[in-house]
Amino acid sequence: MSRAISDQLPSFQFCPLNPQFKETYYKYLLELVKAGVDGFQIDELTFWEHGCGCGYCREQFFKDTGWQLPVNELDPRLGNTNSDLGKLWFDWRRKQIGNWFVELRRRAKEINPNLTLCMYTTHWGFTRSGPRYKEGTDLFELARAINYFGTEVMTRNVLQSSRPLVPFRKMKNALTTAFGTPVWGWIYASDWPTCYFAWAASNMVGQVALLPEDIDRPKNYGDFRTFDGSPDNMHRTRAQTVAPVALLFSAASRDWNSMTSFTGELFGIAQTLESMHVPYEFIAEMSLNEKQLAKYQVLVLASDGCLSDRDLAAIKTFARNGGTVYLSTVAGLCDEYGRLRKQWGFADVFGFTVNAAKTVKLARLSADAGGKDAVTPEKQLSAWTLTPAPATALLYGFTAQGQKLPLLVEKAYGKGKLFYQAASLGGAFCAPEVSPPKKWEFRIDEKLETLFRGELARIMAPGHYWTTDAPDQVFTAIWHDDDELLVHFLNATGANIKAGEEMVPTAPKVPYPPLAKDITFTLPGKYASAVAVSPDFEGRKPLELKENADGTTTVTLPKDLLKAYTIVRLK
Ligand SMILES: [Zn+2]
């Protein structure tokens, strides 16, 4: 049995590394593969919080690392993720679980080289460090063996929670980008309109939705299940995203960031980019290389505090080659184990350093050095201080005492440039995922949002692929599918939950309100035809195209052709 580290007593589970357990379990699984089983999802094969401190695990840990796991359960380093021993221990455990699945695949290969191994986490399980510390499992580690990833989506009201939901679904595609693995979403829905939304939100990010089958379709809704497999739908495994902006989901920052939230800044930026219709995707550290970065114009580091020397070099090469890099708060202050660097990782670029320990509270923000048209944030914002402070900036913060701080600094670098933002502005716009019966607490600070969106528009300019007047709450996504360009529109304007209201599982009274006006959008290139397709209407509806003198094309999607979800196919 596995032994608890806290008291050395046997626990309720087998030690996953125990050679006898492994041989017995592998043998059992391989018998099933021989019998024709196509794949497995082996749920929760992890260490759990208690372990494992058995003799075998201790010996292996020592062999692999040269470190001893203390037998004294009162040793303060045990369970302390800030100690070198704690970091090494947690890292070693998740590698062992990864190895466990690699070994299973290696053995099964002889019998069925196409065996499918599934594994999933909730959004929470992917973004928070807790699961790595407690259970010792990590999808990035498991990707060495897993070829079909998934998510249990816990919001229970996907339409009302659409603001955080869509970026969270896109986040999981970092696994697709890095490893080519498809992603599924196991979604809870209690009525047809939310089922439909869940399917559409998955479809538009190239994922498969697993949905309840016992919900009847009201007569006034088309059947997305028929549409799903029809030639009108996007070919999810063939299509390629159009996303000139990459957001770095740094697993090291998730696990070791200590000075500020990793998720707040990153997902606040993502949620704001959704409202602005800026096409983006998430990448992880393994995609930080010249070849993969070449497809992006803008790389967003947000508050990715923990970056390795290799990461830093790849990011700077991207900028030197002409890319735009946008970083904020603590990005690059620590190494990949969360240890404070002797010097900030971008000091050589900017000519100043970020003072890790020193933040000051801001009373107002303004793009004007004199504080003209300053915005007072509704919630407290803090800024990191810089030494030596640059004389000019694109945005300034002012303390209650009138001290002026540079908040956004731009620096040319090679053929590209970098932006550093000293406060977590994205963090102010991150709506968390909320399940019934909890209260929705998020509210948009509109004045600050206008300022932030202006800043983002400036930074994202090189990634400015298209323009559209679609409402903020209509989600959009653009994909290449064979020789066509597919533009997805998902109407989430029915999401009307206000701060202080309780989340309920059912869709709002009017789940898909009619749009007030037609949507127009302008894309680069010339197209021979455009049609709208949707589960909401039959057939392909031809759309009006207008060729512009600058080589772009403007398309109009009449408002009555977007009820819930519509794809515009351009050829
Ligand atoms: Zn053990």
Image: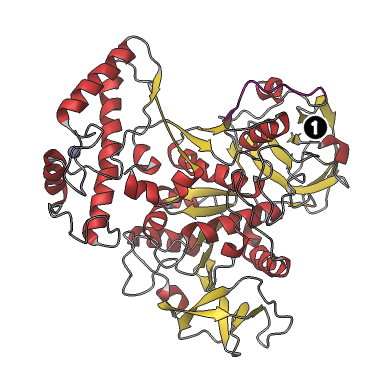
In percent of width and height, residue 517 lies at 88, 47
Q: Which residue: 46% across, 40% down?
A: 175
Chief SS of the magenta region: loop
User: In this picture, which residue range is highlighted in magenta?
Assistant: 209-219
The relative height of residue 352 versus residue 492 in the rendered view (above or below) is below
In percent of width and height, residue 468 lies at 77, 51
In the rendered picture of this protein, how many numbered marks are placed on residues? 1
**Image-based side of 114 in relation to 544, left or right:** left
Q: Which residue: 62% across, 77% down?
A: 394
Q: Identify the image's colour scheme: rainbow, by chain, secondary structure or one colour.
A: secondary structure
Q: Secondary structure at mark 1?
A: strand
The relative height of residue 147 versus residue 296 in the rendered view (above or below) is above
- Mark 1 = which residue? 531
Residue 485 or residue 64, whichever sits in front: 64
Give the position of the C terminus as an image quadrant.
top right
Q: Which residue: 69% across, 61% down?
A: 444
Instruction: Report if residue 409 is visible in the image.
Output: no
